Image: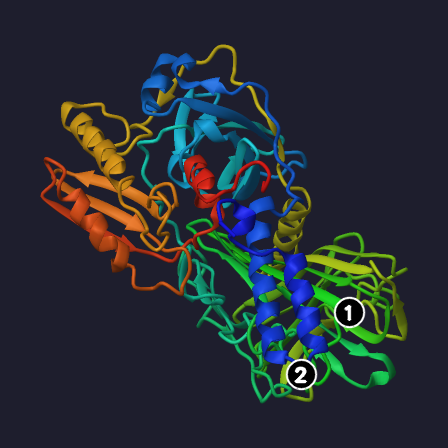
């Protein structure tokens, strides 16, 4: 059979399930296991193709044209063609400085080449007329129909009860990947990362990605309260590596066994976002028992996401536990923290009105807490959980408990929330969801409670986002320019660099991945090229490969270098390689999608 269509070149889930069932009936388990892995690969493709489906995008009318902006701003943004206006409004009377904003926006696919290279964010100061770029980060790119979308993260400044407009610039094919420097640093591979900012260093388990330890950092604008603290795990755990974060788990019917995400030998599924403004590690799957795979029930699916931000003294954890089928449980825990040794001396807790208290939890409040934490009365180090969301569906009432403790068998300090801690019937579709922030800023003797309460209010009342409008009359000002060298062609030297860069992009479209033997798919339309820069007569190219089964990138880098060196005016070509962010099918251009057979019938 000739393979001229996409459907001819691969096999779908239904066909693989048919073959898997047949292999299982025949006892051919090796074949069945291979098919199960192949089904997962197909689902990965479909997830990239169709997106997550649950993103709420900010809707706009007609987008603005840069050349219609006030002349000073249009000159400042030379090189870009289009922009959108976003309004941020503060609603609870708290000044916001460096507050993270995460927007999902769509752009016409015919008006953008590469969202990560092209998008820039600028703040409008209406009082002064100043337009100034702010650092931004792009992730989660998707392509649906004739629109490409992505998450745009930036840190916003808005006065109490104020409103500020931000411009989102796009449509500049000459743009290069921006290089923003913040205090957020990340190292490691996969989900076993070390994430640091000026407030803390978080270390995630290389085995299963759980938060393993936290080191406090002082001397970055804080009052030096003493030697930095490190929160560490200890002991042998329950056979798995110990962590300071032990959630989530549940105990099966008749108290026979416990299922833990910390018992994963590796994450069943995960995705990682790395950037200068946020690092996000998401993991999902069914928890494992102590004798896995003897028991492998597919009952309570768990998803856990850590998000760490630049410049902020807290991180966020969002989780869900969703029942795929009905079952009985005795205990479910969704927030459990254990610190080895005795790093803290005192307890704090937040009542149902959001008021912070020190000491033991008051009678009658134990099952309706809105936060819990511990602090050290000598050096004032603290960790305080701010519970922002804790809800259930098809499960009845749950308990918001988690009273802090100063001793765990005399060896550690802990809090543990068990929203379900007696025999409970989960129904198909039952779910538990939570969103918590963990605050690591110092807890001063004077005013500490107010600091914590204000942070919680900010998190519970994020900036209100809406499509914005530019002021009708404004005295426009701007600092420097939006474009870096080679992105706008302002001088004769830069115009020459832009022209050479365009010739490089054209030449790269002649370089094929010859493992697609009967295809004209080139490295540009296949999305292998992340960036091209020109400095004098030296060309710098950043590339990737589609998956880690092809780490020998010089297989393609050498033909790239050879072709670029043939361009008049190029003396040298440097090809660098990265796995971050990982290639996905959203990297395909419209031409690349057609070449691979991803026409409207597939989409």
Where residue 145 appears, as percent x and y from the top left, is 57, 34
Is residue 267 toward the left or the right of residue 290 in the image?
Answer: left
Q: Quadrant of residue 158?
A: top right
Residue bearing the label numbered 1? 299
Task: Identify the mark at residue 292; answer none if there is no mark.
Answer: 2
Labels 1 & 2 near each other (Cβ < 8 A): no
Which image quarter holds the C terminus? top right
Q: Secondary structure beneath disc 2? A: loop
Colouring mode (rainbow / by chain / secondary structure / one colour): rainbow
Where residue 93 appears, as percent x and y from the top left, is 65, 36
Where residue 225 appears, as percent x and y from the top left, is 47, 66
Give the mark nearer the N terminus: 1 vs 2. Answer: 2
Q: Residues within 10 Å of mark 2 (few under 14, many from 20)?
A: some
Is residue 50 toward the left or the right of residue 520 in the image?
Answer: right
Is residue 372 toward the left or the right of residue 110 in the image?
Answer: right
Total tally of numbered discs in the picture: 2
Taking the spot 60% from the left edge, 59% from the top edge, the residue there is: 305
Query: Above or below — where is 289 with respect to 223?
Result: below
Outermost residue on the top side: it is 473
Query: Above or below — where is 219 with respect to 292?
Result: above
Outermost residue on the front side: it is 1
Taking the spot 55% from the left edge, 61% from the top edge, the residue there is: 41
Q: Out of 479 and 65, give the one closest to the viewer.
A: 65
Is residue 37 toward the left or the right of residue 389 in the image?
Answer: left
Asked whether the viewer can see residue 350, the reply is: yes
Asked whether the viewer can see residue 244, the reply is: no
Where residue 578 appears, as percent x and y from the top left, is 34, 56
Q: Quadrant of residue 285?
A: bottom right
Q: Out of 401 and 534, give the one closest to the viewer.
A: 534
User: CA separation, marks 1 and 2?
Assistant: 15 Å
Q: Secondary structure beneath disc 1? A: loop
């Amino acid at each position: 059979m000739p393979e001229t269509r996409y459907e001819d070149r691969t096999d779908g889930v239904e066909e693989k399930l048919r073959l898997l069932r047949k292999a299982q009936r025949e006892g051919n388990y090796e074949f069945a296991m291979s098919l199960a892995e192949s089904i997962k690969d197909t689902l990965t493709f479909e997830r990239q193709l169709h997106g997550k489906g649950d993103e709420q995008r900010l809707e706009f009318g007609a987008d603005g044209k840069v050349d219609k902006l006030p002349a000073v701003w249009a000159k400042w943004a030379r090189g870009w063609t289009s922009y959108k206006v976003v309004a941020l409004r503060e609603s609870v009377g708290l000044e916001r400085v460096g507050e993270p904003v995460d927007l999902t926006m769509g752009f016409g696919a015919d008006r953008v080449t590469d969202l990560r290279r092209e998008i820039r964010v600028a703040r409008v100061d209406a009082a002064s007329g100043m337009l100034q770029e702010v650092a931004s980060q792009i992730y989660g790119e998707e392509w649906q129909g004739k629109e490409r979308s992505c998450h745009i993260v930036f840190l916003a400044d808005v006065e109490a009860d104020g409103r500020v407009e931000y411009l989102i610039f796009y449509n500049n094919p000459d743009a290069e990947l921006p290089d923003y420097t913040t205090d957020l640093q990340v190292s490691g591979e996969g989900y076993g990362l070390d994430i640091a900012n000026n407030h803390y260093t978080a270390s995630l388990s290389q085995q299963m990605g759980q938060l393993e330890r936290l080191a406090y950092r002082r001397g970055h604008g804080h009052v030096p309260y003493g030697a930095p603290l490190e929160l560490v795990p200890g002991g042998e755990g329950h056979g798995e590596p110990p962590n300071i974060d032990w959630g989530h788990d549940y105990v099966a019917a008749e108290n026979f066994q416990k299922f833990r995400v910390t018992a994963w030998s590796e994450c069943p599924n995960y995705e990682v976002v790395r950037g200068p403004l946020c690092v996000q590690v998401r993991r999902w799957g069914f928890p494992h028992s102590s004798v896995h795979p003897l028991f492998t029930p597919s009952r309570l699916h768990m998803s856990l996401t850590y998000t760490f931000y630049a410049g902020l003294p807290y991180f966020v954890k969002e989780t869900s536990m969703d029942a795929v089928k009905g079952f009985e449980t005795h205990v479910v825990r969704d927030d459990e923290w254990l610190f080895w040794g005795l790093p803290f001396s005192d307890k704090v807790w937040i009542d149902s009105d959001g008021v912070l208290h020190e000491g033991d939890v008051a009678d009658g409040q134990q099952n309706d807490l809105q936060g819990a934490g511990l602090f050290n009365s000598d050096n004032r180090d603290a960790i305080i959980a701010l519970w922002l969301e804790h809800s259930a569906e098809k499960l009845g009432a749950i308990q918001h408990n988690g009273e802090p403790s100063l001793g765990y068998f005399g060896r550690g300090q802990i809090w543990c929330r068990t929203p379900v801690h007696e025999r409970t019937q989960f129904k198909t579709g039952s779910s538990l969801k939570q969103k918590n922030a963990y605050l690591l800023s110092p807890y001063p003797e004077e005013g500490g409670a107010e600091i914590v309460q204000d942070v919680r209010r900010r998190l519970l009342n994020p900036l209100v986002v809406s499509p914005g409008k530019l002021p009708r009359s404004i005295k426009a000002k701007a600092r420097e320019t939006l474009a870096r060298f080679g992105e706008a062609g302002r001088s004769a030297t830069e115009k020459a660099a832009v022209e050479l860069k365009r010739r490089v992009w054209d030449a790269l479209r002649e370089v094929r991945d010859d493992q697609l033997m009967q295809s004209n798919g080139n490295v540009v339309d296949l999305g292998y090229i992340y960036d091209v820069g020109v400095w004098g007569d030296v060309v710098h190219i950043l590339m990737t490969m589609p998956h880690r089964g092809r780490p020998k990138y010089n297989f393609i880098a050498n033909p790239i270098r050879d072709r670029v060196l043939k361009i008049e005016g190029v003396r040298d070509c440097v090809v660098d390689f990265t796995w971050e962010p990982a290639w996905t099918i959203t990297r395909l251009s419209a031409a690349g999608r057609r070449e691979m057979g991803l026409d409207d019938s597939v989409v």
